[in-house]
Image (cartoon, rainbow, N blue to C red):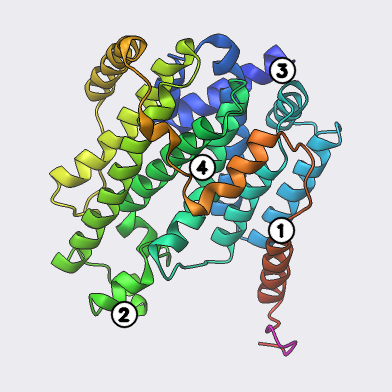
Amino acid sequence: MIRPDDLDHCREAIRHGSLSFHAASRLLPAKVRDPALALYAFCRLADDEVDEGEYQAGAVFRLQERLDAAYAGRPRNAPEDRAFAAIVEDFDMPRALPEALLEGLAWDAAGRRYDTLSGVRDYAARVASAVGAMMCVLMRVRDADALARACDLGAAMQLTNIARDVGEDARMGRIYLPLDWLREAGIDPVNFVRDPLPTPQVRRMVKRLLAEAERLYLRSEAGINALPLQARTGIWAARLIYAGIGKEVRRQVYDSISMRAHTATTQKLGWLIQASARTGVSVLTPKSPVIYAPPLAEVAFLVDAASHGRRSAGRPMTVLNILAELKAREAGIGTDGTTT
């Protein structure tokens, strides 16, 4: 069980760090909400350490060590780590799920860019769909079809975040838009990060990304209705709140460079009310055949790991390779062994 003081710490971290998730989580039953807050606090801390630290390879290495310690039952003496170790034990959390998240964070640390939309979905699978699959585990849901739709929802949320943050990311030297889209638009990535502008071509790419997110939001709905009844309202709220961010980007005519979309408290309250209404309707609604749609190819490994309950898993070689690359880069050594 999660220690009460550790849970209080995680709850405060989320209340200050993620208003959208905190608002949606309030509608979850306590038996799901409390471990979800602890899980999200661990994931958020991991993301912040890699995102904000100067020595990113070291941050990823430390996260791998913390993950090893949690699964060994000897977590680091910190509230998030102790709470996460309790989740691993209580819910038999498949290790492949947090390992996938770590891999996505390693990709961020390496400054990886993605040639195609499928590549962007690969990234979203790791940093967001993996969290959706872990949420299902916290609800004791291991059905492959429900897991596939939870992964759809996670990917949709991440695509929404990418669409909202195009300008902010570019000013940090990051590009998450598919590179082939930029090439089609005649945009040089080097020039784009130097001086990102909300040109008609860039706005069309943001619009295109949000269209893909909307497709996945719609697919995810069948999965929400397959969750335990008490948990549906909170997940509906998350779906509506994050999709609402996309609506704000559309209202700004897809300009996510000179401005950043925000949603108001009154809007969130409206979506919470809608979430309750949709939960009520779901009780009377027949199961949608969309629930049986195959998972995205990019998330299939998550669905397989979660549905089969594989708690132990080998460390992905890609993480090790990326870490070696980062260490070499930060030490000023080229990939061929020469000093740079």
Q: Residues within 10 Å of mark 1 (few under 14, many from 20)?
A: some
Q: What residue did someone put label 1 on? A: 58
Q: Tell me the distance, in whole angstroms, between the alpha carbons under discs 4 and 2.
A: 30 Å
As shown in the figure, which amino acid type bears the numbered disc 2? Asp
Q: Quadrant of the N terminus?
A: top right
Find numbered disc 1 in the image and state the secondary structure of the residue it sits on. helix
Q: Tell me the distance, in whole angstroms, between the alpha carbons under discs 1 and 4.
A: 25 Å
Q: Which mark is residue 2?
A: 3
Q: Tell me the distance, in whole angstroms, between the alpha carbons under discs 3 and 1.
A: 28 Å
Residue 119, image x, y percentages:
46, 63
Residue 234, image x, y percentages:
42, 19
Say if 129 sits above or below 113 in the image: above
Q: Which mark is residue 188?
A: 2
**Among the two numbered marks 3 and 2 on one chain, the one whose residue lies closer to the N terminus:** 3
Q: Which mark is residue 245?
A: none
As shown in the figure, which amino acid type bears the numbered disc 1? Gly
